[in-house]
Amino acid sequence: MNNNNPKQQISIELGENEAQGTYSNLAIITHSPAEFIIDFTRVVPGVPKAKVQSRIITTPQHAKMLLRALQDNIEKFEARFGEIKIEGHSNPQFGFTNADSSEKIN
């Protein structure tokens, strides 16, 4: 079967508020059979409570595609700027964690 449909171009608009970005130094990842949920938070030293700044809900397939895209970009970054070191991080309570476990994801 011959598919003559050209690939559709998608125009992505970045709003002024979204362009500012949101800083996060902790992400908590949970999942169900149908979706992955990533809660991005900002932990401040000395403050016992952290508020979720942003929640992303996505399919398992898109989560895996995100993993691959991040890996590709990390490899490109490290080829240009050197290895990103995470051992001996100054505060081990910050970072990415799996909500199903108390283990930190390195």
Image (spheres, helix red, strand yellow):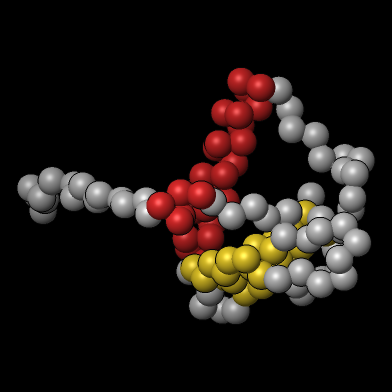
Q: Where is residue 2 in the image (x, y as percent from the top left)?
A: 9, 49
Whole-percent x, y for residue 70 in the image: 57, 44
Q: Nearer the viewer, residue 43 or 39?
A: 43
Residue 29 position (above or below residue 76): below
At which x and y percent is residue 62?
A: 47, 60
Asked whether 58 or 27 is in front, the reply is 27
Q: Does residue 64 show up?
A: yes
- Looking at the picture, tell me which residue is in the foreground, 83 or 47: 47
Q: Is residue 105 visible?
A: no
Q: Is residue 11 left or right of residue 57?
A: left
Q: Tell me the residue at 54%/57% (across/down).
A: 64
In the displayed image of the protein, which residue is found farthest to the front?
A: 16
Which residue is rendered at x = 41% and y = 52% of the image? 16
Which residue appears at 87% of the width and 57% of the height? 45
Side (left or right) of 16 relative to 98: left
Residue occupying the point 77% across, 74% down: 100
User: How many numbered discs sit on the rendered protein?
Assistant: 0
- Asked whether, in this view, residue 92 is left or right of residue 62, the answer is right
The relative height of residue 42 versus residue 37 in the rendered view (above or below) is above
Relative to 96, 60 lies left or right: left
Residue 105 image point, x, y percent:
78, 56
